[in-house]
Amino acid sequence: MKKSDKEKAIRDNFTQLYSDFHSAIYKFCLARLNGDSAAAEDAMQNAFIVLYKKMQGEKEIEFPRAFLYRTADKMVLKAQSENSKHRKHNISLDDSDEAAVDEQEKVYNELDYSLLIARISKGLNEDETELLRLKYIYGLTIDETAAQLGISKPAAAKRLQRLREKIKENYEKGVCENDA
């Protein structure tokens, strides 16, 4: 294959991946960055830049979706670290009203989802919670979940089966119920 044909194939593949996953990766970053849309956009774009550079290398990326989530997660952690260093402690009175309305809207939108996740996660250990996040929140396939966790596909499938059984058992025992 000619170099120009290879470059075109890489661009076409990248364009398809961007089209397929940019919205999901942006939402993932947005949720992890507590609604900071500018930082989420930057993290998402940086994840795709890393993907494109990796695609130009010799080794093919077997699970691009999992790669994107893993890379986006790293970009989010980097953004959170930078934000904590440069966080402003003072805001103007004009900006405070807008910030309060935005924060209230964000809380209302995430309240039900956060409560549900908290209830389901109750009684799960850290590894089980990570597996729950990867498979059911991020929507990764078994293959992508296994790759993300660094385990085999059968091991991931077995852990998912045990996780579902544990969640069902916890629900039946009332562990997932309201504390109220």
Image (tube, rainbow, N blue to C red):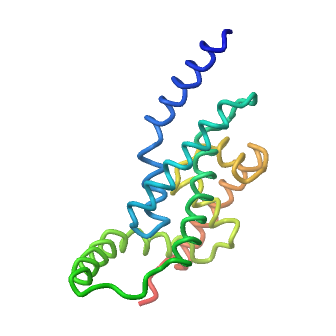
**x and y percentages locating residue 92 in the rendered image:** 27, 85
Image position of 25 with respect to 172: above or below: above
Query: Is 170 placed left or right of 114 in the picture?
Result: right
- Judge by depth and name the residue closer to the eye, 126 or 64: 64
For the point 74% across and 43% down, the residue is: 153
Residue 67 point in image, percent of width and height: 64, 45
Residue 147 x/y as whole percent: 72, 46
The quarter holding residue 95 reads: bottom left
Above-or-below relation of 16 to 67: above
66 or 91, which lies in front?
A: 91
Q: Is residue 9 above or below residue 100?
A: above
- Name above or below for residue 115 compared with residue 91: above
Q: Exactly how many numbered labels are in the figure?
A: 0
The quarter in which the C terminus is drawn is: bottom left
Q: Position of 11 compared to 112: left or right?
A: right
Q: Residue at x 60, y 12 (%)?
A: 5
Q: Nearer the viewer, residue 67 or 176?
A: 67
- Front residue (pair 73, 139): 73
> Which residue is drawn at the image coordinates 68% and 9% (left, top)?
1
Relative image position of residue 10 (x, y in whole percent): 59, 24
Hey, which residue is sitting farthest top in the picture? 1
Q: Residue at x 65, y 44 (%)?
A: 144
